Image (tube, helix red, strand yellow):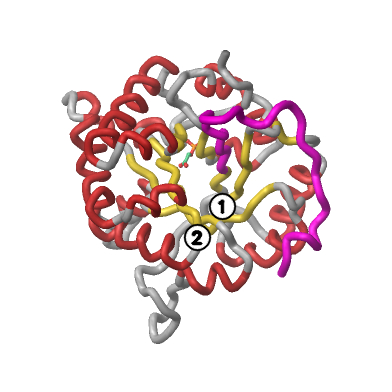
Amino acid sequence: MHHDKRPKGSSTGEPPKEGERKYLIGGNWKSNGTLASAKALIETLNKGGPIPANAEVVVAVPFIHIPLTLGSLRGDIEVAAQNCGVNEKEGAYTGEICAKQLVDMGVTWVVIGHSERREGFGMAGEDNELVVKKVKVAVDAGLKVMFCIGEKKEEREAGTTMDVCAAQLAPAAKLLAKEDWSKVSIAYEPVWAIGTGLTATPEMAQETHAGIRQWIATNVSEDVAQAVRIQYGGSMKGSNAKDLLQQPDIDGGLIGGASLTEDFVTCWNCCIRRS
Ligand code: PGA
């Protein structure tokens, strides 16, 4: 399945200037949708008009809807999976989809370490080490990764937000080679803001994003810290995206609920480079 078979969209505005980070707007459909609703949503996005030239848009769809999406979504929106196996190769791993299989299908991105997967919804959750192993397997297979981190409510209240983020990032500083980081975007998603309608204020989010960038500067490198995109996730929607995206260290969003509607189009149109 090749992207050039898909209808082309058009872009608007100026591409990022030298040294500026390009916004990354991810939609996370989670385990939502039927064949009919996925088709309808693809149609809505296809009719959504131009995407700003300083933004990249990606939708993370359920595995089962990947072929449909690759076959009918406009070519200027990339397609992500929401998880992949830690197994490097295909084989006897019942129920698992590995990064190489995703690449083979034409998928270019994967979301790894989403807080719902870390929590586990009735299954064992994924720990910090496992998440980073998956990031490495995915990057090595040729995927780009939205690597999710973020604190829970009680951790924020206890004042340990940056410690939690640092513990989630630490295995990546060890396992990823410097060049791997160009394939990684960090999605900072405070767990208490996910699906709750509660959003971090732009100032609160900016403070943590700046902390994460500083951590990368200290523990990976200054160059990686300047280049790496840090998306905000947690009830981002059309009505709050602009204020969040104006913050100097917020380079995009990972959007759940609002990515299931036309509101996602409003979000990508909020990628107006802060002056
Ligand atoms: P939300 O989800 O936008 O519905 O809060 C974000 C996410 O879980 O990635």
Q: Residue at x 56, y 55 (%)?
A: 80
In the image, the segment drawn in magenta is 1-26
Looking at the picture, does residue 18 appear above or below residue 178?
above
Tell me the tag on residue 60: 1
User: Which amino acid type is marked by label 2?
Assistant: Leu
Q: Crowdedness of circle 1 by 10 Å Cα count: few (<14), some, many (20+)?
A: many
> In this image, 77 relative to 147: left or right?
right
Residue 63, picture quadrant = bottom right
Main SS class of the magenta portion in the image? loop
Outermost residue to the front: 18
Q: Who is closer to the viewer here, 251 or 71? A: 251
Rendering coords of residue 110 (x, y %): 49, 56
Residue 235 appears in the rendering: yes
As helix, strand or loop, the secondary structure at mark 1 comes to strand
> In this image, 82 relative to 220: left or right?
right
As helix, strand or loop, the secondary structure at mark 2 comes to loop
Q: Residue at x 69, y 54 (%)?
A: 38
Looking at the picture, does residue 56 appear above or below residue 42?
above
Residue with the mark numbered 2: 143
Q: Is residue 24 within the magenta segment?
A: yes
> In this image, 231 relative to 220: left or right?
right
